[in-house]
Image (spheres, helix red, strand yellow):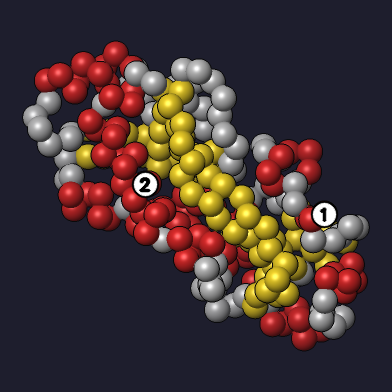
Amino acid sequence: MENVALLVQEEITQSSAPLGKIRVGVTEGLGVKFLASRMVGLFERYPGLEVELVAVPRFVSILNREAEISIHLERPSADMLVTRKLTDYRLALYASQAYLDRAPPLRSREDLGRHAWIGYVDDLLFSQELMFLNSFCRNPQVVFHSTSVIAQQEAARSGLGIAVLPCYMAAADPQLVPLLPAESIQRAYWISTRRELHKSVRLRVVWDYLVEQCAAQQQVLLGPGI
């Protein structure tokens, strides 16, 4: 990956149109299920750009030079970073109709303890923001664990149980049924870069585009009815 000196020096010599590569680190769900399909507009505006989207179920470190831009579940606190809130988003309960047809009735929050759940591998969580099952059910019967939220979505689609999924992933999925609409939680994504890189024109056009796309898609990120 390009070092900081090269990135800044390139800005001095390049033309007015941003050119070159920017690496964006992002959590898996947002990168795969939201950002990837919305990047075309960036390249229509700036055809000289090249973007590496590192979408993984962990933090991508700016301080360790793993990326120039990183999107986090928690606000980074390092003084050498420029950080802002990218967007709020909402998570809700989803299951397949096949699961609901064979499972106990689900009419209220009190019924959730009788159901099979899908969740994360607790001792491999990369953020405390992902510890949310107990927000819905005091003692959830988790039958399937995965470090991947996409794997959790696929398990729910197959009829394995109830999953807590971001609305931007699940609300438009025809194989998933939203459950108990009043039961949801809100979280936020934070975007950051190294302070010296924030002056880069190449980086700023990517940064601004990501902010713009999230601002324009609030109904998708926060769910139907918002």
Please give the count of numbered marks on the rendered protein: 2
Observer-nearest of 116 and 63 = 63
Q: Which mark is residue 210?
A: 2
Mark 2: few/some/many CA within 10 Å (<14, 14-19, 20+): some
Residue 144 visible in image: no
Residue 202 sits above or below residue 129 on the image? above
- What residue sits 60% from the left and 37% below the top? 74
Q: Amino acid at mark 2?
A: Leu
Q: Amino acid at mark 1?
A: Asn
The percent position of residue 214, horizontal first and vertical second, equals 41, 53
- What residue sits 59% from the left and 77% below the top? 175
- Earlier in the chain: of badge 1 and badge 2, it is 1
Q: Residue furthest bottom?
A: 101
Q: Quadrant of residue 204?
A: top left
Q: Which mark is residue 134?
A: 1
Residue 223 sits above or below residue 128 on the image? below
Residue 97 sits above or below residue 39 on the image? below
The percent position of residue 58, horizontal first and vertical second, equals 59, 38
- Tag 2, which secondary structure? helix
Observer-nearest of 74 and 96 = 74
C-alpha distance separating marks 1 and 2:
32 Å
- What residue sits 79% from the left and 61% below the top? 136
